[in-house]
Image: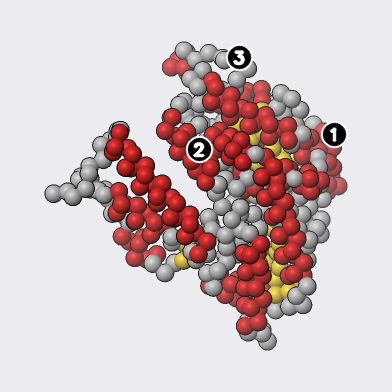
Amino acid sequence: MTHHPIVPLDPTGDALHDLTREATAFLTDWLSELPASPASDYRDTARLTALLRRPPGDDPGHLGDLLDTFRQAAGQGVNTAGPGYLAYFPAGGLVSSVLAEMLAQAANRFTGVAQTAPALVAMEHGVLTWLAARFGLPPGSGGLVTTGASPANLSALVAARHARLGEDARDGTLYVTEHTHLSIAKAARIAGLPGRGVRVVPSTPDLRMDVAAAARMIEADRAAGLRPFLLAGTAGTTSTGTVDPLPELARLARAHDLWFHVDAAYGGGFQLTRRGRATLTGIGEADSIAFDPHKSLFLPYGTGVLLVRDPALLHAAHAADGQYLQDIGQIGDLPDFGHLGVELTREFRGLRLWLPLHLHGVRAFEEALDEKLDQATLVHRELAADPRLDVPWEPDLTVVVFRPRGGDEAGRELLARINATRRVYLSSTTLGGRFYLRLCVLSVRTRPSHVRLALDTIRTTLDHLTPTP
Ligand SMILES: *Cc1c(COP(=O)(O)O)cnc(C)c1O
């Protein structure tokens, strides 16, 4: 016996209207409660994780109950959508992109090749070529919207391997630093390169790739019969947001005929700002750029971008053919995204970018990112002025690392206590063998009042920290 309407598999009319109304009411409530929600919450986690593994029943459920379950589950753990989230790389998640996602999935057109949805592919391609131009890549550049920077780094590496090494990658070497994101080494492993091929170039005391050391390693490796093929610079490292010396790295890569990849997963969005362009100078010299709009364009998780100077090389490394694709032809100069990356079938990911950019306008992003740069400058200034803290590096972008003068144990204690307030949530990293707390201002929802709250919370927690003997 059911007291609620059964939702048909393909609802139309009133049933559809009721369904979407209930979902949007849920969305509105959820977002309005977000600022007051705890920055992290594990109080009900044990009960809920046990309860929620229940398999689906044969009989229909009730949408209201199911949404309530989702609300409880989504409230557990770290509140990555909320304004107090200052760990890793916060973005918030623009609602315009959420709506775009719903509409794109409802249209459910096939964008793996241009022929089945040429105008949608053109919309996505337009965003990619606009981004490429903003980075200073030449006309004719292109790329792919991925689910994140990890697959973007992978496809860039595979394109570089294919273009520079051909079939036999055994003696190939690529150059990173200890601050390079783990996804590059992971990509090398997936791409079939031996672990010894990932060469870790020393960093300078300001945490940037040592260009002279990189040049010496490349020359020594080549003299030893190895085949250097890729130099990976980072525009905003994960630990400290530091930007490698991109113009010098570009010159080094050219001089040695290496593919120059720039991992701008975090830093890329700042290219829309004047200060960011100055910091990222040289990025337009890259052969490929990975960028995460789910970081510095405030989008929800699941949106990465790969940009390449020569899309033909990306195509050559990924394209394959099958008899079942024999009806598919080329449409003008539109790309077939299914031949540029790992996926064939994919959602129309372009609308997630296209709708927010066109709806809000590019200036809104520039201003919001400028606000983040200002906020990070403020955080750095205030923390550096506190005699109890050691704050060794000025931020290139919006990541500030700091440690209490008491040492690593005091640092861990400070982080645990700050996060236990549930007002803000920070993370940590290790640099030069030492523990650092790490604060990143990047969420669209983190406004000046939340930054002041974070600074207050850090200071008050320090006041109560037991001094280490
Ligand atoms: C976040 C990040 C990545 C990985 O990106 P995902 O979107 O998590 O796959 C790669 N490189 C850098 C520099 C990052 O900050």
Q: Is residue 65 left or right of residue 223?
A: left
**Distance in Å between CA atoms under marks 2 and 3:** 26 Å
Q: Residues within 10 Å of mark 3 (few under 14, many from 20)?
A: few
Instruction: Give the vertical position of 355 relative to 391 (above or below).
Output: above
Q: Residue at the spot x=61%, y=41% of the render?
A: 360
Q: Residues within 10 Å of mark 2 (few under 14, many from 20)?
A: many
Q: How is the image coloured?
A: secondary structure
Q: Amino acid under label 2?
A: Ala
Secondary structure category for the residue under label 2: helix
Q: Nearer the viewer, mark 2 or mark 1?
A: 2
Q: Which residue is mark 2?
A: 100
Secondary structure category for the residue under label 1: helix
Q: How many marks?
A: 3
Instruction: Tell me if label 1 and label 3 are in contact, CB under 8 Å.
Output: no
Residue 256 pos. (x, y %): 82, 34
Q: Quadrant of residue 446?
A: bottom right
Q: Which residue is mark 3?
A: 332
Instruction: Give the vertical position of 318 relative to 385 (above or below).
Output: above
N-terminal label among 2 and 1: 2
Residue 161 is labelled as: none
Q: Residue at the spot x=74%, y=69% of the render?
A: 382
Residue 95 pos. (x, y %): 52, 46
Q: Which quadrant is the C terminus positioned in?
A: bottom right
Q: Amino acid under label 3?
A: Gly
* Residue 118 seen in the figure: yes
Q: Which residue is mark 1?
A: 255
